[in-house]
Image (spheres, grey):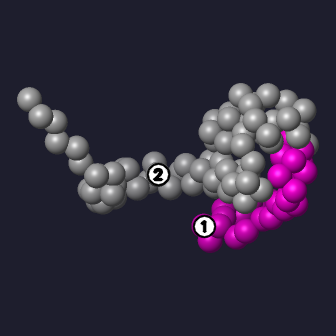
């Protein structure tokens, strides 16, 4: 029996039609944003995870966990990552455009 593979783009297009999927995907945006930024910084520095780890004084496994998005690193760790990749860490606050419930007292 021959298996038929469906391209990821096709699956994603189908999933985006489901409001529950869209809501869950949006909820992960922050997690993916940090992981993507770390991967991009390392890529722009033309470094391997092992090279970044050596520059940070840690192991490749730690860098892999940081880039997986499954851990929330401290600001200190992000600073070390930035220094290792010859980048500058910038943290900003942006409006979320959601209504805020005001407390009245």
Q: Is residue 31 visible?
A: yes
Residue 11's label in the rendered image is none
| Rendered image: mark on residue 25 | 2
Residue depicted at 87% across the width and 47% down the height: 84
Kind of element beneath mark 2: helix
Task: Judge the density around disc 2: few (<14), some (14-19), many (≥20) Cα neighbours within 10 Å.
Answer: few
Q: Could one spot residue 18 in this view of the protein?
A: no
Left or right of 4 in this view: 51: right
Total number of numbered discs in the rendering? 2
The answer to if 39 sits in the magenta stretch is no
Hey, which residue is sitting farthest left in the picture? 1
The answer to which quarter of the image holds residue 51 is: top right
Q: Secondary structure at mark 1?
A: loop
Residue sitting nearer the eye, 100 or 3: 3
Magenta span: helix, strand or loop, mainly?
A: loop
| Viewer-closest of 80 and 47 | 47
Q: Is residue 75 above or below residue 65?
A: below
- Quadrant of the drawing holding the C terminus: bottom right
Query: In this rendering, would 104 be left or right of 19?
Result: right
Q: Position of residue 36 (x, y in %)?
A: 64, 53
Distance CA(mark 1)–CA(mark 2):
18 Å
- Name the residue at 27% across, 57% down: 10
Q: Position of residue 89 (x, y in %)?
A: 86, 58
Which badge, 1 or 2, is on the more N-terminal residue? 2
Dot 1 crowding, Cα within 10 Å, few <14, some 14–19, many 20+ = few
The span picked out in magenta is: 77-105
Q: x, y percentage for residue 32?
A: 60, 50
Q: Are marks 1 and 2 in contact (CB under 8 Å)?
A: no
Q: Is residue 90 above or below residue 71?
A: below
Residue beneath disc 1: 98
66 to the left or right of 51? left
């Amino acid at each position: 029996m021959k298996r038929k593979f469906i391209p990821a783009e096709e699956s994603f297009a189908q999933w985006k039609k489901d409001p529950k999927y869209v809501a869950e995907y949006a909820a992960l945006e922050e997690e993916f944003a940090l992981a993507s930024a770390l991967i991009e910084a390392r890529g722009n520095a033309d470094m391997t995870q092992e090279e970044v780890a050596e520059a940070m004084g840690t192991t490749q496994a730690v860098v892999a966990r940081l880039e997986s998005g499954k851990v929330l690193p401290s600001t200190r760790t992000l600073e070390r990552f930035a220094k290792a990749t010859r980048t500058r860490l910038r943290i900003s606050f942006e409006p979320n455009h959601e209504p805020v419930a005001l407390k009245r007292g």
